[in-house]
Amino acid sequence: MNALSILGRGVEQGAAWLLGLLWLLPLVFAVWTAFHSPAYMAHFSFTAPLTLENFKNAWQAAPFARYFLNTTLLVIGILIAQFTLCTLAAFAFARLPFVGSRLLFALVLIQLMVAPDILLLENYRAIKMLGLMDTLPGIALPYLASAFGIFLLRQTFLTIPKDLEEAARIEGCGPFGTLWRVYVPIARPIYVAYGLVSVSWHWNNFLWPLIITNSVETRPLTVGLAVFASSDQGIDWSVITAATLMTSAPLLIGFLLFQRQFVQSFVRAGIR
Amino acid sequence: MNTLRLSLYGWLMVLPAATLLALFTHIPVVESFVHSFMSTDKPKRPSRFVGLDNYDSLVADPIFWKALTNNLIYALGSVPLSIAIAMMMALFVNDKSAGRSFLRVAYFTPTILPMIAVANIWIFFFTPDYGLLEQILKPLGLGGNNFLGSNNTALLAVTIVAIWKESGFFMIFYLAALQQISPDLKEAAAIEGAGRFTFFRRVTFPLLMPTTLFVMVNALINAFRVVDHIFVMTGGGPNNATSVLLFRIYEVGFKYFDFGLASAMTVVLLCVLGFVALGQFFALDRKVHYQ
């Protein structure tokens, strides 16, 4: 290796770490602010005493326990419904030659371009008409039939050899039995990947729930956090930052613990 | 099993998903068009056909043009930069160098944070007087900025946040693509005496083209869809300097309750997305693909 390429590698390493630092800086800053008293907000010293006071204050200042419950129920409900609906549709598109399946599949793919978020006006009307305003099902409904999920699972099902299906049929399995005993178990890693993507997506969703909810009983964490942070009642930044970290904590901790699986899952969902 | 029964099973399995998709995607798209030609439903005056009235008001509305321009600047600013950064990140952490998994985590972390949380963190960065950026700039004699409160910098600030949040997500797609490039190519290039940069320019970069197209389409869609941070950071201000299409739709629809005008704007947004789809279609046609 010549000098030039060693230099090149050095520059690359330096740039990589600089970028990493830049990417972590806002988070480090947030963690610092959340765990110190407001006096140390922008005053960095190693001797600054750590405190959980900000988290305590945030937790007491708004009904975050309820928000956590709402978000958890929402995310789990969406996940179960998405798995069910997308599995059935994906299997039909992949393996059952039904009339109109190509046209229908093309129609499904439209949702990859036009997400329900874009159509908030009309979806608001629809939810209102169904009498589901300010309810968790109202937040969930537009997202349950996910084109991404259908597409991802269909691609996976297509790679599964048909021989396995034949074997299952000889054993006396109908289409549903084959799907449940053969296809779903083989596609497990894809379900994990899709599940992680879905959970983090809906944990973080904001605009649609903002429109649909207007009570503590249904508000998810993101909306609760925004309401909390914008109520200018002398809440200081340390407390807001603590609340911010608190609401992101479950995903963040889950990610840090299982980062390899997380990244791999996203990669898997990305190759399609 | 006969074909008819299979077909029946197929329809039954697709039906639940298809119904929901029709209810919340296809019908709303059509309805957006229909309602853009109707007046807003009011207690005394029910909605009626008004032709192009809503579009006339839209064209005459300077804030709409402002939001559209802002959105284009936001897209043109964030898309190429986050793609370039994402590609760089993927190349950095794909190599087997020390600390590579640490860096991967560092790059990816913003992706899993809620945009609302991200916005809260970054507001503090941009805050006048005691914000972190001010603290860096003040000693250099460049203090006294109000990044989010000034017409010149607010849009830039929101764009930077979008880049920070999304680059790590796009990196994942590049990582996936890089892992599929055969190591033989690297060996062959080494035998030919190609340097690392030449290898990137002549081999890696072209092989990543399909991924770049895919990422670009997604980034473009996101540039018109992801507006959460604007709610928290600027509320569209100052003087609509950070208002973008979807934000404006929300404002007109749910604050001023002018559904007709908001529907017309939704149609504009749908057309923009349609252009993106057409662009993707033609790009695919021009063989960015190697498969």
Image (cartoon, rainbow, N blue to C red):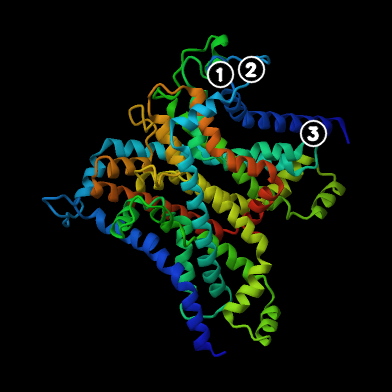
In this picture, is B26 found above or below B114?
Answer: below
Q: Which residue does the numbered mark 3 point to in the structure image?
A: A9
Q: Quadrant of the N terminus of chain A?
A: top right
Q: Which residue does the numbered mark 2 point to in the structure image?
A: A49
**Considering only order in the chain, which callout, 3 or 2, is on the residue closer to the N terminus?**
3
Q: Is residue B291 visible?
A: no
**Considering only order in the chain, which callout, 1 or 3, is on the residue closer to the N terminus?**
3
Write the residue at 40% across / 21% down.
A234
Q: Give the label, 3 or 1, closer to the camera.
A: 1
Q: Amino acid at mark 2?
A: Pro
Q: Amino acid at mark 1?
A: Ser
For marks 1 and 2, give the CA distance. Answer: 8 Å
Write the residue at 53% across / 71% down.
A88
Q: Secondary structure at mark 3?
A: helix
Q: Give the label, 2 or 3, closer to the camera.
A: 2
**Considering only order in the chain, which callout, 2 or 1, is on the residue closer to the N terminus?**
1
Q: Which residue does the numbered mark 1 point to in the structure image?
A: A37
For marks 2 and 3, give the CA distance. Answer: 41 Å
Horizontal side of A196 relative to B63 (left or right) equals right
Q: Chain of mark 3?
A: A
Residue A261 percent coordinates (x, y): 69, 50
| Mark 1 surroundings: few (<14), some (14-19) or many (≥20) residues within 10 A | some
Q: Quarter-wise, where is residue B16 in the image?
A: bottom left
For marks 3 and 1, give the CA distance. Answer: 42 Å
